Image (tube, rainbow, N blue to C red):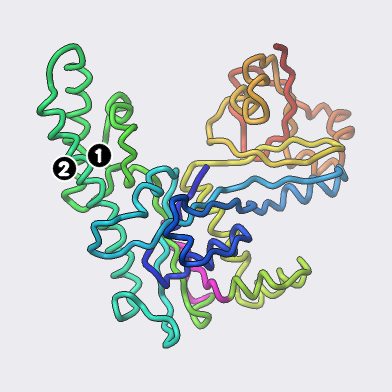
Amino acid sequence: MKAALLGYSQAGKKTLFALLTGRKILSAQLKEKEAPEGCALVYDPRVDTIAKLVKPEKIKYAEIRYVLCPDVEAGSKERLWLEEARKCDLLCIVARDFASDAVYHPAGSVDFERDKNDLMSELLFADLEIVEKRLERIAKEKRGEHKQEQAIEEKALQKCRSVLEQGKQANLSALEPHEEKAIRGLGLLTFKPVLCVRNISEEKIGKLKDDVGIISISCKIEEEIAEIADPTERQEYVKSLGLNTSGLDRMNNAIYDAMGLMSFYTMGKDEVRAWTIKKGSLAPTAAGKIHTDMERGFIRAEVIRYDDLIKLGSENAVREHGKVAIKGKDYVIQDGDICSFLFNV
């Protein structure tokens, strides 16, 4: 899964990208052909707890892949950020909400609401442009053996155009499944989940609560948190700020929620690992995340509930108490399931 970081210059995108992925990027690199990418570990305390019981050789958290898009430049026809954003599954708009004489703002002043709304408008205008061009092409080409498919696509595009012209996201177009499938290849930005990251000053830490679709983070404070090597000391510092978790962890969790994702786990003496799947996924799909052969030759899954493992203290105890469930192809994986899969190819 890929998440795009996009916004105006001096909003904190490069700092946020470095904090999430450990990669420091120079401004000149944003002009290169390939946008910088990097992986962020999704901290999951359940992985740590399982590992304490199993004592594996290694542990592996789930990951989110971030793409650092070129700066959005208001009014510019050269939208280098656009193609990179289209390749991603989710968009993270980074908007500045801190004042600094040392860091200029492209608009001349700091106004979070203005920047957030203007950036959303950039997405809407980009989508409307694509929709209009596609409708024009269909009007010229509407003939022959693909006429029925074009009619479905045209109707879907007209619905999208209507909501986009109202300043609403294309994913509010109330498309039928076959209509959505017809325009999926266009990569409309506002069909993707959009999360806004509000880069705030230190003074606002603990005073601004996260809102629907908005995560408040101080990149400067997150840099200080990242410098604390000891996990216990780090958590104590986070709590001293009036927070339960760091901004980066909240951001990753918000992306999971926006994408409708959850985690299941595998455990053994060699490795304890978190795997990411869509909510509502069936057991064979989960098996396929580990290896495609497991999905193709799926026979059954052995499932241990996380709470049962923690309560009873070991896999052997879970088995002795009859708490291992045998599930077939129709089982819907639940968040926190610890799974092993039997397959044959």
Task: Kindly identify which residue carries mark 2.
Answer: 162
CB under 8 Å between discs 1 and 2: yes
- Mark 2 Cα-neighbour bin, 10 Å: few <14, some 14–19, many ≥20: some
Residue name at image x 85 percent, y 38 percent: 270
Question: Label 2 is placed on what type of residue?
Answer: Ser
Which range is magenta?
A: 206-220
Q: Of 317 and 132, which appears nearest the observer?
A: 132
Disc assigned to residue 173: 1
Residue 315 in the image, given as x and y percentages of width and height: 85, 35
Q: Which mark is residue 227?
A: none
Residue 67 drawn at (x, y percent)? 49, 52
Secondary structure that dominates the magenta span: loop
Compared with residue 143, is residue 42 higher up or lower down, i.e. above or below?
below
Q: Residue at x 50, y 51 (%)?
A: 255
Please provide percent x and percent y for residue 341.
73, 23
Q: Quadrant of the C terminus?
A: top right
